[in-house]
Image: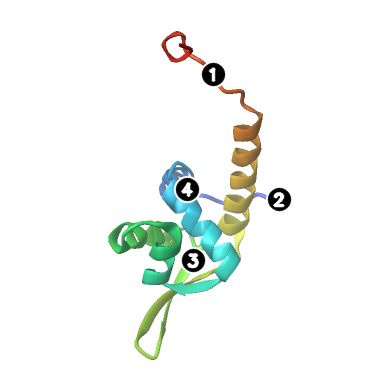
Amino acid sequence: MSSFNVTPEQLVIFHECLGSKVCIRIFQVFLANRSLNVSAVSRKVGCNNDRCIEHLKKLAKLGIVQEEFYAGRHSFALKKGDFTDLMQQAIILMDKDEKSTPNIVHRGDSQ
């Protein structure tokens, strides 16, 4: 992947997105569906509309999704770009790391 400029604000938002399971699930829903309205996204992810919109706004600030208005319908669509590629690669790395990390048993948990 080539390098690109990132502002401090974008870096913070990107970090927040990667730290949120809901945001990651929203991104993955868009990878599979490309364009959906807010209700459909929140239903597929399992969160309420307000929380979904909060994360969609963060993804929109990064240019990962874009808002669309068609015939009075408000929806979002996945957008191609550097942050979209970076988000996808980061999630893949996080999944690999999660699978390779052994389960840690604490003394109080073992009995």
- Specify the label residue 31 is tagged with: none
Q: Is residue 96 above or below residue 2?
A: above
Q: CA distance from mark 1 to mark 3?
A: 37 Å
Residue at 56% in and 71% down: 34
Q: Tell me which residue sits at (49%, 54%) in the image.
A: 25
* Side of 104 relative to 52 (left or right): right
Q: Amino acid at mark 4?
A: Phe
Residue of label 3: 65
* Separation of residues labelled 4 and 2 (CA atoms): 17 Å
Q: Which residue is mark 4?
A: 14
Instruction: Classify residue 75 by image quadrant.
Output: bottom left
Instruction: From the image, tell me which residue sits under label 2.
Output: 1
In the structure shown, which secondary structural element does the residue marked by tag 3 occupy?
strand
Residue 49, position as x, y percentages in the image: 31, 64
Q: Residues within 10 Å of mark 3 (few under 14, many from 20)?
A: many
Report x, y in % for residue 81. Answer: 60, 63
Q: CA distance from mark 2 to mark 3?
A: 20 Å
Q: In what element is the residue under mark 1? A: loop
Q: Which residue does the numbered mark 1 point to in the structure image?
A: 104
Circle 4 SS class: helix
Point out the tag, 4 or 2, that comes first from the N-terminus: 2
Of callouts 1 and 3, the N-terminal one: 3
Question: Dot 2: within a 10 Å radius of its alpha carbon, few (fewer than 14), some, or many (20 or more) residues?
Answer: few
Q: Amino acid at mark 1?
A: Ile
- In-image side of 77 versus 93 (left or right): left
The amino acid type found where label 3 is placed reads Val
Residue farthest toward the front in the current orientation of the protein: 111
Check the image and tell me how it is coloured.
rainbow
User: Residue at image x 45%, y 63%?
Assistant: 44
Task: Check if mark 1's residue and mark 3's residue have beta carbons within 8 Å.
Answer: no
**Residue 4 appearing in the image:** no
View extreme (right): residue: 1
